[in-house]
Image (cartoon, helix red, strand yellow):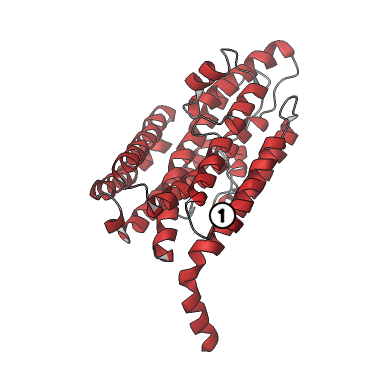
Amino acid sequence: MLSRVAENLYWMARYLERAENTARLINATTQVLLDLPRGAFFGWDVLIRVAGLDNLFHEHYAQADEDNVVNFLVRDESNPSSIVSSLHNARENTRTFREVLPMEIWERINDLHLFIRDNASRATQGRGLRHQVLNGVIERRQSIIGLLMGSMSHDIPYQFLKLGRNVERADMTTRIVDVNSAVQLPADPALTVPALERLWMGTLNAMSAYQMYRRHVGVHVRRKDVVNFLLKDAHFPRTVRHCLDEIEGCLSVLPRHDEAMRASRRAWRRLDGMRLEGLAPVVLHEYMDQIQADLGDVHAALARQYFDLHHAPAMEAGVSQ
């Protein structure tokens, strides 16, 4: 298949996943703030740092308060990772290869784009309205994935969709986990222990993972168990381990996959070697940074192997001129 089509499929899937996970990230942060005990501290500036967007944010906003951060992440088109920007880019990518996808996919993606265009401003008008809008994004995006899984041939184009979805999902899972590492809790154990349980329960709920955690881990919500589950569980589809397994499965059916497969396996080995018990928050943050860097290497290897090919003629023309 054409390199350009492969790249557009990959990025369409990444943009859709990014929109959904940005909604989940905001929901997780809101839940953290609701559950903080007296004496604890957490600022909205943490959210843009976790998302890796702090430099861009401060180019446009003087203060990292709730209204500015939510506006920046939901509707600000100067932010290429905002929900509005991500869904616009997903829609534009889809326009270029509609013949590759089931006809209904274009309609669903266009519907999601129109939904966020018409409702993005409501996300900044209070937490209740914000929750409704963000859940609307999550639910509509989930319907798109369900339709793709059930009505698209699982051939080479589908593998590039899965690659984009799982690279982005693994990266965003580490960022959602990382939110809690920035919470400064009070020194009193009587306040800290129940607060930690509520914080991590909120994280599980934000990722639709609470019921599966209870089923496979237990009823008690402990930081080490939640982090281990969200990073290393092989079966829950939003964990880093599951995403890496999916990436390897996709690569195994693609030609010339050696470089990307090596990058994926390096990431897998680093994840497998992480010891997650008794981690200080600063160490957990460093671990999340390491995983994000490894996923960046996977993306770079994919780009070199599969996506840069259609740029080559233009580059050669530029040299010859």
Residue 54 at x, y percent in the picture: 61, 48
Residue 60 at x, y percent in the picture: 54, 53
* Vertical position of residue 317 compared to residue 227: above or below: below
Kind of residue indicated by mark 1: His
In this rendering, position of residue 5 left or right of residue 277:
left
Residue 36's quadrant in the figure?
A: top right
* Vertical position of residue 297 compared to residue 140: above or below: below
Give the number of callouts: 1
**Quarter holding the N terminus?**
bottom left
Residue 143 at x, y percent in the picture: 32, 37
Give me the residue at 61% from left, 40% from top. Answer: 45
Q: Residue furthest bottom?
A: 321
Q: Residues within 10 Å of mark 1 (few under 14, many from 20)?
A: some
Camera sees residue 267: yes
Residue 282 at x, y percent in the picture: 74, 35
Residue ID for mark 1: 299
Give me the residue at 42% from left, 59% from top. Answer: 6
Q: Secondary structure at mark 1?
A: helix
In this rendering, position of residue 102 left or right of residue 62:
left
Give me the residue at 30% from left, 42% from top. Answer: 115
Camera sees residue 76: no
